[in-house]
């Protein structure tokens, strides 16, 4: 298949594509990782992924929601909502009682979805490229 960066509409180069494939393979075989996929007529139209982590001091389990992606033409059709709901339920089943999600500030749709699920802003991440 062809993979595109959502914002830039550029085809991913082979090195980036291979890195993504390797990361997905690692996630699929890991016991702490969860990847859910939405399909339509045998084609992947979205996915959600996360992991079960332990808090540094308390060692209590929490669910870390890392990815929710829906192909552009299938957005606003409750697919993201269904994936997020199933991801949270699976994380709960595995012992998580607290959840976090990292979302880009500009990703208003994901922020709105998470708010509907009871998530709230907690902290900020600052990034600097050199």
Image: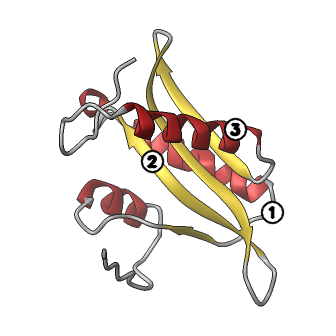
User: Which quarter shows the N terminus?
Assistant: top left
In the structure shown, which secondary structural element does the residue marked by tag 2 occupy? strand
Q: Quadrant of residue 104?
A: bottom left
Q: Position of residue 98 (x, y in %)?
A: 66, 72
In the structure shown, which secondary structural element does the residue marked by tag 3 occupy? helix
C-alpha span from label 2 to label 3? 16 Å
Q: Residue at x 57, y 47 (%)?
A: 49
Q: Which residue is mark 3?
A: 28
Q: How is the image coloured?
A: secondary structure
Q: Position of residue 9 (x, y in %)?
A: 18, 36
| Crowd class of label 2 (few under 14; some 14 to 19; many from 20; radius 10 Å) | many
User: Of the residues tagged 2 and 1, which is closer to the observer?
Assistant: 2
| Crowd class of label 3 (few under 14; some 14 to 19; many from 20; radius 10 Å) | some
Relative to 39, is 66 above or below? below
C-alpha span from label 2 to label 1? 21 Å
Q: Residue at x 79, y 78 (%)?
A: 60
User: Which quarter shows the C terminus?
Assistant: bottom left
Q: Which residue is mark 1?
A: 95
Which label's residue is closer to the chain start, 2 or 1?
2
Residue 65 or residue 27, whichever sits in front: 27
Q: Which residue is mark 2?
A: 68
Which label's residue is closer to the chain start, 3 or 1?
3
Q: Position of residue 12 (x, y in %)?
A: 32, 34
Residue 19: mark: none
| Label 3 with label 1: CB-CB less than 8 Å | no
Which label's residue is closer to the chain start, 2 or 3?
3
């Amino acid at each position: 298949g062809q993979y595109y960066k959502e914002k830039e509409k550029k085809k991913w180069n082979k090195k980036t594509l291979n890195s993504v494939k390797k990361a997905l393979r690692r996630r699929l075989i890991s016991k702490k990782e969860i990847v859910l996929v939405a399909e339509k007529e045998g084609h992947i139209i979205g996915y959600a992924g996360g992991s079960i982590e332990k808090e540094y001091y308390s060692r209590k389990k929490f669910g870390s929601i890392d990815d929710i992606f829906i192909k552009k033409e299938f957005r606003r059709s409750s697919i993201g909502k269904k994936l997020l709901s199933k991801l949270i339920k699976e994380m709960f089943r595995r012992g998580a009682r607290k959840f976090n999600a990292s979302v880009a500030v500009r990703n208003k749709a994901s922020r709105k979805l998470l708010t509907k699920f009871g998530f709230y802003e907690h902290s900020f991440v600052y990034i600097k490229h050199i």
